[in-house]
């Protein structure tokens, strides 16, 4: 590998991901390059030495018990539960999207919450009534356009 070239990991990202950045700090690139320079048999010998060292150090290790399973949480009502809003606000977006930010200004979240409280049948009934109104509006607009064409012609 040519050492004069820039390392791709050092090139800044347009939108850096904090999770990737956290783990990139823990990567030993020099060790990776050394291992890539080894042949397959050399890598196998290196792994055998590592396994032997771990076997000899096994007596010095203490074994930890796995943590207990977390207590089961109650279901979250996203419409009214303030804990859900606190959790959602605590998770930052990786990068703000200006288009989404612009549209979010016009979103009526209260209306969405009210809609989510309805059953699927009630939502369908409301949708059917909306479509009926749309068809009525379309028919009246077409009738008005025909009348204006007749009066002009």
Image (cartoon, rainbow, N blue to C red):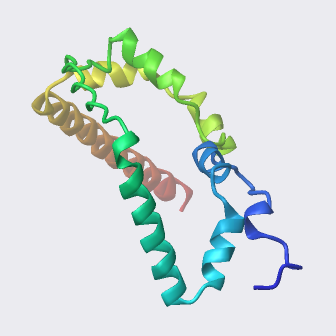
Q: Is residue 3 left or right of residue 62?
A: right
Q: Residue at x 44, y 21 (%)?
A: 87
Rendered location of residue 4, percent (x, y)? 89, 79
The front one of 8 and 138 is 8
The front one of 107 and 145 is 107
Q: Is residue 82 above or below residue 8?
A: above
Rendered location of residue 37, percent (x, y)? 66, 84
Q: Quadrant of residue 100?
A: top right
Q: Residue at x 34, y 44 (%)?
A: 59
Rendered location of residue 92, percent (x, y)? 58, 31
Q: Quadrant of residue 39?
A: bottom right
Rendered location of residue 67, percent (x, y)? 28, 27
Q: Is residue 106 above or below residue 73?
A: below
Q: Quadrant of the N terminus?
A: bottom right
Question: How many numbered dots are placed on residues in this image?
Answer: 0
The front one of 73 and 75 is 73
Q: Residue at x 49, y 89 (%)?
A: 41
Q: Is residue 81 left or right of residue 101?
A: left
Q: Is residue 12 left or right of residue 44?
A: right
Q: Residue at x 36, y 57 (%)?
A: 55
């Amino acid at each position: 590998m040519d050492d004069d070239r820039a390392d791709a990991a050092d090139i800044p990202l347009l939108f850096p991901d904090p999770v990737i950045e956290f783990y990139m700090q823990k990567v030993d690139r020099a060790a990776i390059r050394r291992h890539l320079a080894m042949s397959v048999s050399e890598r196998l010998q290196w792994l055998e030495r590592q396994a032997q060292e771990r076997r000899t150090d096994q007596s010095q290790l203490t074994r930890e018990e796995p943590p207990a399973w977390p207590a089961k949480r109650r279901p979250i009502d996203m419409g009214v539960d303030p804990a859900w809003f606190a959790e959602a606000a605590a998770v930052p977006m990786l990068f703000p999207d200006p288009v989404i930010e612009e549209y979010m200004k016009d979103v009526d979240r209260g209306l969405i919450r009210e809609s989510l409280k309805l059953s699927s049948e009630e939502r369908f009934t409301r949708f059917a009534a909306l479509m009926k109104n749309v068809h009525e509006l379309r028919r009246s607009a077409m009738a008005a356009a025909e009348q204006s064409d007749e009066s002009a012609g």
